[in-house]
Amino acid sequence: MAKNKAEDIMTKDVITVAPKTKVKEAIKLMVKKEVSGLPVVDKGKVVGVLTEADALAARTTQNVESAMTQRVYKVSPDASIKSIAATLKKNNIKRVPVVDKAGKLVGIVSRRDILAAKL
């Protein structure tokens, strides 16, 4: 089966944090799970992304919502891998949340996922 859409390559068990999570706790999670960014989810919807750069610039005692990147690029499960790669490159980002028609988080696609799909 050809892997050519987000739903074919996305990680479904996405590691997320809530807006009120302390940055220190988010950093612990990033290190433990070996991820470089976390979608910030409120009531199932992505409201931001906390990246390593965001975490480096933040105070560990502040809430994630005050440190996160608020502009989030999202894709649908049927988005093509080619269009996702273009979005990542154009916006200089490393990952993109995958959301359903209701805007609920259903997965995430990273640069590494796209590279693995090329193998």
Image: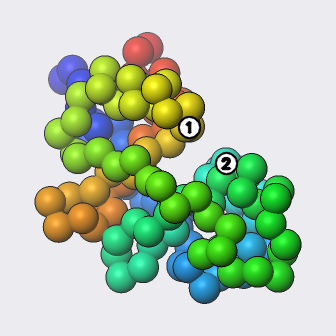
Front residue of 41/32: it is 41
Mark 1: which amino acid?
Lys
- Residue drawn at x 29%, y 45% is 75
- Residue drawn at x 65%, y 74% is 66
- Residue drawn at x 36%, y 82% is 43
In this rendering, position of residue 76 left or right of residue 93: left
State whether residue 10 is above or below residue 31.
Answer: above
Q: Are marks 1 and 2 in contact (CB under 8 Å)?
A: yes
User: Label 2: how many residues lie within 10 Å, few (<14), some (14-19) or many (20+)?
Assistant: some
Mark 2, secondary structure of its residue:
loop
Total marks in image: 2
Res. 9 image quadrant = top left
In this rendering, position of residue 80 left or right of residue 113: left
State whether residue 10 is above or below residue 54.
Answer: above
Which quarter of the figure is the N terminus placed in?
A: top left
State whether residue 82 is above or below residue 113.
Answer: above
State whether residue 69 is above or below residue 41.
Answer: above
At which x and y percent is residue 21?
64, 82
For disc 1, the marked residue is 94
At which x and y percent is residue 26?
70, 70
In this rendering, position of residue 80 left or right of residue 48: left
Mark 1, secondary structure of its residue:
loop
- Residue drawn at x 74%, y 50% is 53
Res. 58 image quadrant = bottom right
Mark 2: which amino acid?
Ser
- Disc 1 to disc 2, how far (Cα)? 8 Å
- Asked if residue 28 shows in the view, the reply is no
Question: Please, which colouring scheme is shown?
Answer: rainbow
Which quarter of the figure is the C terminus placed in?
A: top left
For disc 2, the marked residue is 36
Disc sitting over residue 76 in the figure: none
At which x and y percent is residue 2?
21, 21
